[in-house]
């Protein structure tokens, strides 16, 4: 079975771990958000790709939810002493090794897809990581302070600076990478991970060619709600949804994505048991919908969420 997942960082990584356990014989491809990417202190940083890679490799810091386990931060301290970079955005020494390697590959002429493949080859991930585009589409946030990079809004202000809108700079000139397009078109099942609907999945969908690939794909598209009982458990998704005028509600997010039968991207939507009351409204939208436990705790629960999503792919 060929399974392709659209995913962002932490939530996408947890879902990917569960999927790998639930479908160990599947050919899994993960089309990842690159809107959080940036150049910092001369190196290319790809937060979502790295979160996915580290989690699948078993080397991620599960306590912090980002970066490498067993980190040190001597280089970051030196950069701060020199007044270089963002002192509030700490890159660990092991993590910097990844960014330096990626930067070297890009400087040698590799695409981001090629560089990601080279980095990923170090570990048996059980999945293929694919940037949605090889072009740069950094997400900026329009705030009262001015226009700042999404990571600055997210990390420095903790999403407290009032945001007026999110802008993926240059997205209109970007295009879906051919490997990402192939992964979508050749899939037997397409899954939308419970990642931030605005700045993760939303950025992926904003890349020209992605929606068209989903619209014409033969595979069913099943989404997993990132909202449980009206709460976004991680990633400040509720704040991001508020900015674009969408309620932090499982059915509202499904309506935001839309049903493929009505010009959207979904065929089915898996919600938490706490949101079972909205199943009727989801079906009125033209979606197959079921309610199941959705907490992505490591091991069995995350794998069961993946199994339930795969089961919903079959009418």
Image (cartoon, grey):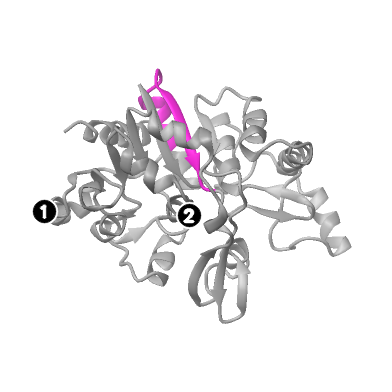
On screen, residue 120 above or below 281: above
Counting from the top left corner in percent of width and height, residue 173 is at 56, 55
Front one among 144 and 207: 207
Q: Counting other residues with Cα less than 10 Å from the Cα at mark 2, is it few (<14), some (14-19), or many (20 or more)? A: many
- Write down the residue under mark 1: 280
On screen, residue 9 above or below 232: above
Q: Write the residue at 39% across / 69% down.
A: 244
Q: Counting other residues with Cα less than 10 Å from the Cα at mark 1, is it few (<14), some (14-19), or many (20 or more)? A: some
Element on which disc 2 rests:
helix
Counting from the top left corner in percent of width and height, residue 56 is at 53, 32
- Write down the residue under mark 2: 203
Q: Is residue 32 magenta?
A: yes
* The N terminus - image quarter: top left
Counting from the top left corner in percent of width and height, residue 47 is at 60, 48
Task: Tell me where the magenta segment starts and ends, as one range.
Answer: 15-33
Numbered marks: total: 2
User: From this viewpoint, which residue is outermost toward the top?
Assistant: 25
Counting from the top left corner in percent of width and height, residue 180 is at 49, 36
Q: Write the residue at 57% across / 42% down.
A: 49
User: From this viewpoint, which residue is outermost toward the bottom?
Assistant: 144
Rounded to the nearest angstrom, the CA distance separating label 2 from label 1 is 29 Å
Front one among 29 and 307: 29
The numbered mark, 2 or 1, whose residue comes first in the sequence reads 2
Element on which disc 1 rests:
helix
Residue 186 appears in which quarter of the rendering?
Answer: top left
Q: Does the magenta stretch include residue 132?
A: no
Left of 70 or right of it: where is 131? Answer: left
Q: Write the residue at 40% across / 20% down.
A: 24
Q: Write the residue at 38% across / 25% down.
A: 2
């Amino acid at each position: 079975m060929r399974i392709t997942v659209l995913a962002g960082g932490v939530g996408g990584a947890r879902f990917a771990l569960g999927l790998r356990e639930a479908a160990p014989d599947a050919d899994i491809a993960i089309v990842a958000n690159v809107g959080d990417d940036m150049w910092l202190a001369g190196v290319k940083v790809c937060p979502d790709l790295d979160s996915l890679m580290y989690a699948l490799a078993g080397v991620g810091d599960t306590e912090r939810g980002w970066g490498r386990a067993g980190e040190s931060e001597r280089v970051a301290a030196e950069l701060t002493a020199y007044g270089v970079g963002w002192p509030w955005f700490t890159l660990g020494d092991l993590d910097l090794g990844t960014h330096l390697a990626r930067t070297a590959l890009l400087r040698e002429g590799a695409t981001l897809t090629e560089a990601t493949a080279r980095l990923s080859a170090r570990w048996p991930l059980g999945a293929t990581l694919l940037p949605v585009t090889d072009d740069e589409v950094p997400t900026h946030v329009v705030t009262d302070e001015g226009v700042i990079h999404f990571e600055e809004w997210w990390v420095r202000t903790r999403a407290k600076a009032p945001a007026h809108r999110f802008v993926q700079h240059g997205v209109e000139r970007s295009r879906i990478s051919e490997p990402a397009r192939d992964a979508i078109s050749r899939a037997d099942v397409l899954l939308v991970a419970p990642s931030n609907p605005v700045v993760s999945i939303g950025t992926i969908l904003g890349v020209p060619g992605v929606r068209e690939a989903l619209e014409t794909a033969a595979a069913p598209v099943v989404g997993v709600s990132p909202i449980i009982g009206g709460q976004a458990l991680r990633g400040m998704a509720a704040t991001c949804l508020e900015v674009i005028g969408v309620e932090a509600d499982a059915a509202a997010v499904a309506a935001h994505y839309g049903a493929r039968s009505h010009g959207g991207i979904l065929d089915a939507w898996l919600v938490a048991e706490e949101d079972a009351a909205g199943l009727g409204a989801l079906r009125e939208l033209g979606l197959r919908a079921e309610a199941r436990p959705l907490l992505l705790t490591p091991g069995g629960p995350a794998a069961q969420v993946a199994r339930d999503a795969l089961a919903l792919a079959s009418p």
